[in-house]
Image: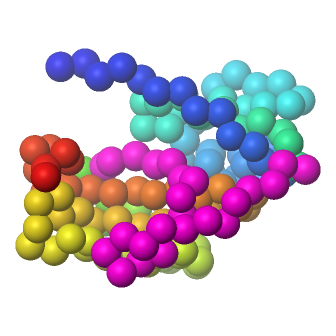
């Protein structure tokens, strides 16, 4: 089944930083751009970094399985092998994790591998993986 692609626009303080982080570190191919924004292919989805250096971001968190999860975040669900490779690459690159790579909800419905980190502008990202697709919405 083909899934619809999502589109997300978000603020960044510097487009060169965004290109280095999303294009370089995360390996997201760059699409169209202007002096005020850059499109990236985020695992088949379109994300757009908009230059907005003065935008304030909330640091609000909610407790989830004993961790302080940033309320405002975005990310993608990867296959477990790809998630592990990304966690290793980010760790080797010295990324400071807001929530280090780990398995959440162990032994419960929805058990998932997860990690949170911030882009250079302070936007929180979560990458996660499940052992099976049926676990994504398990209750």
Give the percent coordinates (x, y) of residue 63: 42, 73
For residue 9, say whether it is visible.
Answer: yes
Query: By what rule are the colours in the image chosen?
Result: rainbow
At x 73%, y 48%, the residue is 18
At x 20%, y 47%, the residue is 136
> Does 70 lie within the magenta span?
yes
Nearer to us in this view, 117 or 28: 117
> Does residue 52 appear to the left or right of 19 in the view shown?
right
Nearer to us in this view, 9 or 20: 9
> Does 117 lie within the magenta span?
no
Nearer to us in this view, 36 or 62: 62
Q: Is residue 88 above or below residue 46?
A: below
At x 42%, y 23%, the residue is 5
Which part of the image, by quadrant, shows the N terminus?
A: top left
Q: Is residue 97 above or below residue 111?
A: below
Q: Which residues are magenta?
A: 54-78
> Does residue 40 appear to the left or right of 19 in the view shown?
left
Give the percent coordinates (x, y) of residue 108: 11, 67
At x 73%, y 32%, the residue is 38
Give the percent coordinates (x, y) of residue 109: 11, 60
Give the percent coordinates (x, y) of residue 104: 26, 71
Q: Is residue 118 above or below residue 136?
A: below
Q: Is residue 86 above or below residue 54?
A: below
> Does residue 3 appear to the left or right of 136 in the view shown?
right
For residue 117, say whether it is visible.
Answer: no
Q: How many marks?
A: 0
């Amino acid at each position: 089944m083909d899934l619809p692609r999502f589109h997300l626009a978000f603020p960044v303080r510097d487009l060169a930083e965004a290109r280095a982080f999303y294009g370089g570190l995360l390996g997201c191919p760059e699409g169209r751009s202007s002096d005020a924004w850059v499109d990236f292919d985020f695992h088949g989805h379109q994300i757009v970094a908009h230059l907005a250096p003065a935008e304030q971001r909330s640091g609000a968190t909610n407790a989830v399985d004993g961790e302080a999860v940033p309320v405002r975040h975005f990310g993608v669900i990867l296959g477990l092998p790809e998630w592990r490779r990304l966690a290793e690459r980010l760790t080797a690159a010295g990324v400071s994790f807001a929530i280090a790579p780990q398995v959440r909800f162990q032994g419960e419905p929805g058990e998932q591998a997860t990690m949170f980190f911030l882009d250079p502008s302070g936007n929180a990202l979560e990458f996660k993986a499940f052992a099976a697709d049926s676990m994504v919405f398990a209750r």
